[in-house]
Every structure is written in C-alpha cells, then in structure tokens.
Amino acid sequence: MAGALGGFNAHASNIVAAIYIATGQDPAQNVESSHCITMMEAVNDGKDLHVSVTMPSIEVGTVGGGTQLASQSACLNLLGVKGASKETPGANSRMLATIVASAVLAGELSLMSAIAAGQLVKSHMKYNRSTKDVSK
C-alpha cells in the first residue's frame, strides 16, 4: 500500500463520500479513508472469483460533530452504531468502518461487473443527460 497513492480501485471514494455525508462524518477525511486496493482472483480452478478490498485508513466516528444532526443521527441509528458503545469502547466506530468497507466492496463488484459485461458505457450512452439517445 505504501507506494500506491490512493490505491487501485474502481470508485471507492464515491461510496466513502456518500456514506460520510449520510452519517455526519467529516467529508475532508474522504482523502485518507478512500485509500483502497481492490483485488480479484480466480479460485477453485477458475470456477469462483474471490474479491476483496483493503482499506487501511478508514477514519470514522459515531459521537460528536455532524453525527448529532437529525438526518445523520437517524442514519447512524438505522445502522445500529449511533453513539459510544457502553460495553466495548470504540466498537461502534469499528462497526461503521466495517460497513464502509463492505459498501465499497459491493460497489466495486457492481461497477466491475458492469464494465466486464459491457453495460457501463452502453447505459451511459442510453441514459445520458441529453435528450438524444446517442447509443443508436
């Protein structure tokens, strides 16, 4: 990871930014928190695909700051990580970091699937913001 500024991923920062805004995190921490290496390798003689993300610096919190805003507080409640854990200090922040990494993994798999199937460009051409379907 040391030599991989930003990492090697499809769009981790998009997902991190969305979750950070939704949960009251500091959006400026997206820079460090989006460092991600996505790995894909064939396993079981090519019958299966193992996909993983490595994100060594996810910076999150579940108390203070933007986490106190109504919508962001509701989102943290929905995720079951609002506030400090009374049983294990830091547990809610660790769970939120796990949720962030899990969402990034899902997003990476989705985008790479669309690219591999040839659907990404096709859908962008069909559903672009102009009034003209440029896919024809």
Image: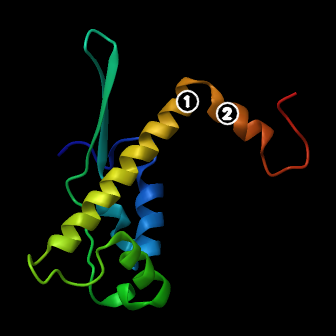
Give the x, y percent position of residue 50.
29, 28
* Relative horizontal placement of residue 56, taking residue 103 as reference (left or right): left
Question: Who's the residue at 9% across and 79% down the image?
Answer: 87
Q: Position of residue 105 (x, y in %)?
A: 36, 45
**In the structure shown, which secondary structural element does the residue marked by tag 2 occupy?**
helix
Q: Residue at x 39, y 86 (%)?
A: 66
Can you see residue 26?
Answer: no
Q: How is the image coloured?
A: rainbow
- Residue closest to the far left: 88
Using residue 14 as the reference point, say whether residue 133 is left or right of it: right
Indicate the quadrant where residue 117 lies.
Answer: top right
Residue 48 spot, x, y in % from top left: 33, 19
Q: Quadrant of residue 94?
A: bottom left
Quote the CA–CA distance across marks 2 and 1: 8 Å
Q: Is residue 32 visible?
A: yes
Which of the pair 119/99 is nearer the observer?
99
Name the amino acid, label 1. Ile
Camera-nearest residue between 118 and 72: 72
Name the element at disc 1.
helix
Q: Which residue is at 56% across, 32% downward?
A: 114
Instruction: Give the farthest residue toward the top.
Output: 45
Structural crowding at the residue carrying mark 2, measured as other residues with C-alpha within 10 Å and reported as few (<14), some (14–19) or many (≥20)? few
Task: Name the residue type under label 2.
Answer: Val
Q: Which residue is mark 1?
A: 115
